[in-house]
Amino acid sequence: MKYMSILEVLLVFKLVLYVNGGRPCASMSFGDSSVVCVCNTTYCDTLDPLRMPAKGSYILYESSKSGKRLESTTGPFIKSIQDSGLKFTFNVDKKYQQIKGFGGAVTDSATVNILSLTKEAQENLLRSYFSEDGIEYNVIRVPMASCDFSLHVYTYADSPDDFDLKNFSLAKEDVEMKIPLIQRAISMSKRPISLFASPWTSPAWMKTNEDVSGKGTLKGAAGDKYHKTWANYFVSMLSASKVFQANIQFFSALDGVISVLSDMKAARYINGIAVHWYMDEFAPAGITLSTTHKLFPEYYLFATEACTGFLLYGKGVQLGSWERGNQYSEDIIKDLNNYVTGWTDWNIALDLKGGPTWVENYVDSPVIVDTAKDTFYKQPMFYHLAHFSKFIPEGSQHVGLDSPEKSKLETVAFLRPDGAATLVVLNQAHADVKFVIWDPEVGYINAVSHADSIQTYVWRRS
């Protein structure tokens, strides 16, 4: 009788899983607090398309510091409980903001890293982000010209005093790299993908310091030739980018939200307010975001950039850092609980150093590319993001989640467009926490949030 080796058994196991559904994480430790999932030309972990369980059952997805990556289980609702302890009540009578989506930025650096892989590995990376067997991003940020995550500095109008923008043109990085890559992402997505564009700088000749970096501002005053040219720069970019065959929105973070939105003439041209996460530690969301929403409820809030590894301590890439995943989820939950309608990561892929970047501003990313091995690593941050992007589609509505007592768990709940419920639970503590979910329409779930884990619960309500 011929016996299979352990390797052969593992290969058969993976093949069976792939035939029947998603592929599991091929985990690897680089010595940090958790693991990465390794992907290459021939293998990458995938997810089953979400299939709603019958009413009366729920499906749970869990990732953990111990190594779980979106592992799914199903279970039944029960009609009654003896001692509930910590209980969360799903409350659709409390309705808040609708969700626009989740995604990341296709920077020059991200594109360089992705295109450094062979075609098959590129496909696996893009599918991981945008396909139904991936985490289904539906938002892409497109930098207008170069940014700090480019190989060199350029704008679309570098000819001095070109107020008529006669020499305006997209760059090679757009035409040959970013646009084709974005088109590939759009083609593999079952969800409509929204694009938004934002500039890192205006052309140097338009700025007071005549430099693309530094603390210069736009020359002149509102209504003059500099400001009109800058406005036409945006229009020209939209016109030149028709190849996207999609709607592009323009975002610019507002320095003086109150002064701008209090101006009737200026406010009519604004639909939303972009926020970044870099000062969240010093500016609590309940003060900044909720206050802004209450002052200007007709304008939506959208988180347009975040990354870890930007501080002097712990700068750059940390392969396998579970804590950096926690930072993402904690921020997303706080934002969503304070009227933010979506959340966008920064570079969707960087190299092992956290670049390339012409200013050597190395940071971390959910996906790290190892060009020499034709391999990429999916970080814990990637899976933390997945617990939101995969299960909270555009059009979902933030609803109430009532609890009579405080807990260490961080939570947020949604009613999906298909009528199903979604609940995300983050446990940053090093101990399990028992709790109960009660949906008056369905019943109770006896649940356990495992130590150092994030969970997403999904169930039908009708």
Image: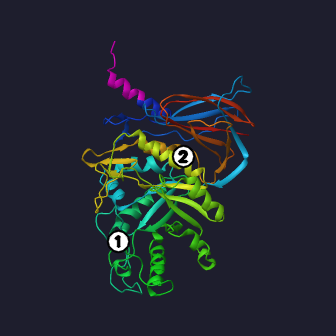
Depth order, front residue of 198/88: 88
In the image: residue 343, left or right of residue 218: right
User: Which quadrant of the structure image shows residue 220?
Assistant: bottom left
Residue shown at 35% from the left, 58% from the top: 111
Residue 209 lies, with reference to residue 96, above or below; the image says below
- Identify the colour scheme used: rainbow
In the image: residue 60, left or right of residue 419: left
Residue 452 lies, with reference to residue 136, above or below; the image says above
Residue extending furthest toward the left:
372
Tell me where the magenta segment starts and ends, as one range.
1-13
User: Which quadrant of the structure image shows residue 177?
Assistant: bottom left
Q: Is residue 100 visible?
A: no
Residue shown at 68% from the left, 27% from the top: 84
Q: Amino acid at mark 2?
A: Phe
Where the C terminus falls, by quadrant?
top right
In the image: residue 60, left or right of residue 314: right
Percent x, y for residue 167?
36, 83
Depth order, front residue of 72/271: 271
Residue ID for mark 1: 171
Where the N terminus falls, by quadrant?
top left
Determine which of the numbered discs, if any, sits on residue 388 in the image: 2
Nearer mark to the viewer, of 1 and 2? 2
In the image: residue 222, left or right of residue 296: left
Depth order, front residue of 133/292: 292
Q: Secondary structure at mark 1?
A: loop
Residue 293 lies, with reference to residue 133, above or below; the image says below
Q: Amino acid at mark 1?
A: Ala
Percent x, y for residue 28?
34, 35
Q: Would you say residue 5 sits in the magenta stretch?
A: yes
Determine which of the numbered discs, if any, sits on residue 46 in the image: none
Q: Secondary structure at mark 2?
A: helix
